[in-house]
Amino acid sequence: MNNRRLRNALLSVVAGVGLLFSLPSEPVIASAETVVNDVNIYFFSSVGCGHCVAEKTFLDEQLTLHDNLTLIQYDIGQTANLELLEEVAGVFEEPTVVTPFTVIGGKHYVGFNGTVEAGLLKNIAKYSSTNHVDIMAKILANQVILPTDFDTSSDFEYDLPLIGTIDVREASIALIAIVLGFLDGINPCAMWVLLFLISLVLNTDDKKRIWLIGGAFLSMSGLFYFVMMMTWLKTIELLIAKQVFQIIVGIFALAAGGYNVYSFIKSRIKKDDGCEVTSVTTKQKIATRVKKIAAATSLPLALLGVMGLAVIVNSIELACSTGLPLIFTQILALNGISTGASVIYILLYILFFLIDDLIIFAVAVITFKVSPLSTKIGKYAHLIGGIIMILIGVLMIFFPEILLFSFL
């Protein structure tokens, strides 16, 4: 991945914050009160069209949120409406007539998916506050359509102050999975347990036992995260009030991110490293359990013990990671990702969640030396993760369309 793609992909996460301070590209008429323009949405649908039903539900939700919206719907089962759609498709140079077909201002959309939804949301906001040409109104009035009437701006580009123009198409859920998974994995809460476990089993000089015990710990950690994240994802998908839950997760992300930033600042003042969630008493109990597992003469019992330990430790680690897995599953649900694709993205998240542990474990087995990562790295990872969580929280609440990565 080149530097430009990486830069733009990461900047797509911060786009929502920049939008809070960005100005509209066209002048807004000044008055004692903020002017809100009337916006018409023209919607061509057909009976038996599943995507039409989905878009109609979405548009009805927008009507309840925006008083200035008017929805004009055409059923192409009627000959006159079909002929009108053919004329409109010709104006927009669409070679085929397909439903749903939507026109708003100087733009049109064919079909309905996350991309179309994001475009409609962006243009509802833009046309509500800026002047625009209603091409459909001109067609209905038999007026001449000028080349300048079409809105040729990209739905995926955002002009941010100081940063410039970014294109969110260059971002991907895969990159989000890698970044969040890696930040989640560099965690002082669980790292010390793995290091302590490795240091004890290294004394046996039995590489097979070391591979099995360490591998069981890491495998169970990955399985625990996978089951937990898939459960969260399916729970989110079953929720009726998804928008409400989305806002709740956004608020949680803001609070959790703020806490991470606060914890970093506090640790720098106190010159403290490590995980605040795991108390000294808890660490002592876990250390005692690790010693028993490492000393167990029965390998099957040792493996069972280490798998149970992995579940306990990663349960504690969830409190230390402060919600990164939950936020990632919310992004998957927001994009309507299929179950098969969700499994792949979650596995990618888990791979980078475990990658630091895998490297340390492999080096330890090969060299018979434990080389831990500095806990300072974990602290800085929490700072970066906290900032990202704050930004994602802002996007989820105010600009969810920027988190829609389901591009054609």
Image (cartoon, rainbow, N blue to C red):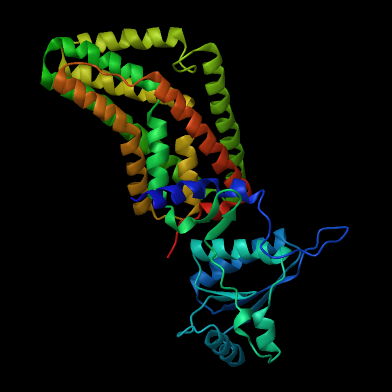
Is the residue 140 above or below the residue 127 in the image?
A: below
Please state the horizontal and vertical placement of residue 211, each as a whole percent of the image.
16, 24
Q: Quadrant of residue 308?
A: top left
Q: Is residue 237 visible?
A: no
Is 48 drawn above or below residue 239 in the view shown?
below
Q: Is residue 387 above or below residue 21?
A: above
Identified at 54% across, 82% down, the residue is: 92
Lateral position of residue 38 relative to residue 274, left or right: right
Residue at the (50%, 29%) spot, across then down:
383
- Give the position of the C terminus as an image quadrant: bottom left
Where is residue 175 shown, x and y percent of the image?
Answer: 39, 47
The residue furthest front is 162
Res. 276 visible in picture: yes
Quarter of the figure with residue 294: top left
Closer to us: 56 or 161: 161
Total labels: the figure holds 0
Residue 247 point in image, percent of width and height? 61, 44
Residue 350 sits above or below residue 318 on the image: below
The residue lying at 62 percent from left, 38 percent from top is: 251
Q: Residue 283 is drawn in which quadrant?
A: top left
Q: Position of residue 185 (x, y in %)?
A: 37, 30
Query: In the visual, does 116 lie left or right of 59?
Result: left
